[in-house]
Amino acid sequence: MKIFITGGCGFVGSNLAIYLKNKFKKSEIFVFDNFFRAGSLFNKKRLLKNKIKIIKGDIRFEKDLSKIPKFDFLIDCAADPSALSGVSDGLSYLVETNINGTLNCLKLVKKNKAKIIFVSSSRVYSHEKINSLRFKTTNKEIFPIKNCKGLDIKKGISEDFDTEGLKTFYGFTKISAEKLIKEYSNIFGTDYIINRSGVISGPWQWGRVDQGFMAYWIMAYMFKKKLKYIGYGSKGFQVRDILNVIDFCKVIELQISDFNKFNTGTFNIGGGMFSRISLSNLTEICKNIFKTTTVPFQSSDERAGDIPYYVTDFSKIKKLSGWKPEIPVEKTVEEIYLWVKNNKSKLINLI
């Protein structure tokens, strides 16, 4: 079995490559990356250490993909992943990577008579719809008050939630890529799985303020950088569910092992109610770890497309496969902290 991973030197792609290499001993894993982000070069060393072949290239360009050897599965982790992409830096790179890049991947899958697993995003769900919900605050966490289509207040947001409303430029590119995959499959019979992920986190995530907030928060405390709460009263009560990258990798392992069970399906993959956290409660954990009283300052800034709440309802894939997240958010925080502590010299200039 040969597995090809685009965006393979990124956080998710590199962790996935190493995980699958260990699980499928007889498989050949090779990754593809354009090294657009600084952390990719550090992840490259890990991959080489694990004897994973790396091909430099960009999914925006068909000629780069023409040098890829034959494969059985393509796992598309390549993306411009920030919800703020395109707001101040133009749309070209975002659209070319997230939509045109997906088309190029589909052409390659068709050529190889292979299967594709596409890593999509919870950002396909309308921020307009989420912000229109009624909320309450309990234990420094924002929660919706009433069920609606695609939202069960005891479970979170399911695949049936609104994807038609406004959803940020990034969310638009991901839902467009999803629709392209489905149309392509309808015409050419391409086998696919779409996984909509929320916040995936863990060691080796080179966090930024606009993407990878768990690692960013911990690094900011480690290096005594200023943090701020933005929007929704500026108290940090916004809630997200956190999925440890290893729990994500386990989903992909299941899907590769029994692809037909999941074929042509779209699945929400996340930590759910089991692993939710607000920025305020993450701050309290960091204060305890770093023995400090420092807290983020309250900012009057607003962020385009922001949402006060997102928790994944993963009932669909759990019912189909039995999968559920196993690693609690506290464990994920501990793993990130230890990784940051052991790699301080590499990380200090990236935040």
Image (cartoon, rainbow, N blue to C red):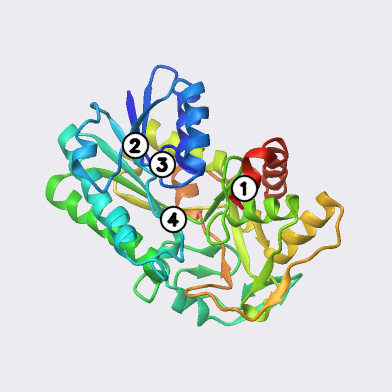
Q: Where in the figure is residue 309, as x and y percent of width and height? A: 58, 69
- Residue 322 visible to the viewer: no
From the image, state whether disc 2 or disc 1 is nearer to you. 1
CA neighbours of label 4 inside 10 A, class few (<14), some (14 to 19), many (20+): some
Q: Secondary structure at mark 2?
A: helix
Report the front residue among 14 and 141: 14
Residue lying farthest to the front in this orientation = 349
Q: Which mark is residue 259?
A: 2
Question: Where residue 91 sits: x, y (%)?
Answer: 32, 65
Mark 2 vs mark 3: which is more N-terminal? 3
Q: Quadrant of the N terminus?
A: top left
Question: What amino acid is found at the position of numbered circle 1 in the picture?
Answer: Asn
Q: Amino acid at mark 4?
A: Pro
Q: CA distance from mark 2 to mark 3?
A: 30 Å
- Residue at image location 23% in from the left, 27% down from the top: 70
Relative placement, left or right, of 7 versus 95 is right
The residue under the point 61% across, 40% down is 203
* Eye-nearest disc, 3 or 4: 3
Query: Which residue is disc 3 drawn over?
Result: 35
Which label lies toward us, 2 or 3?
Answer: 3
Q: Which residue is mark 1?
A: 349
Instruction: Report which residue position mark 4 lands on.
Output: 81
Closer-to-camera residue (286/309)? 286
Above/below status of 7 relative to 168: above
Q: Are marks 1 and 4 in contact (CB under 8 Å)?
A: no
When the figure is inspected, residue 9 is found, relative to residue 119, above or below; the finding is above
Write the residue at 16% across / 52% down: 186
- Earlier in the chain: of badge 3 and badge 1, it is 3
- Horizontal side of 346 relative to 291 (left or right) equals left
Name the kind of residue labelled 3 in the image. Phe
Comparing 135 with 212, the one in front is 212
Q: From what the image shows, is residue 65 above or below residue 231?
A: above
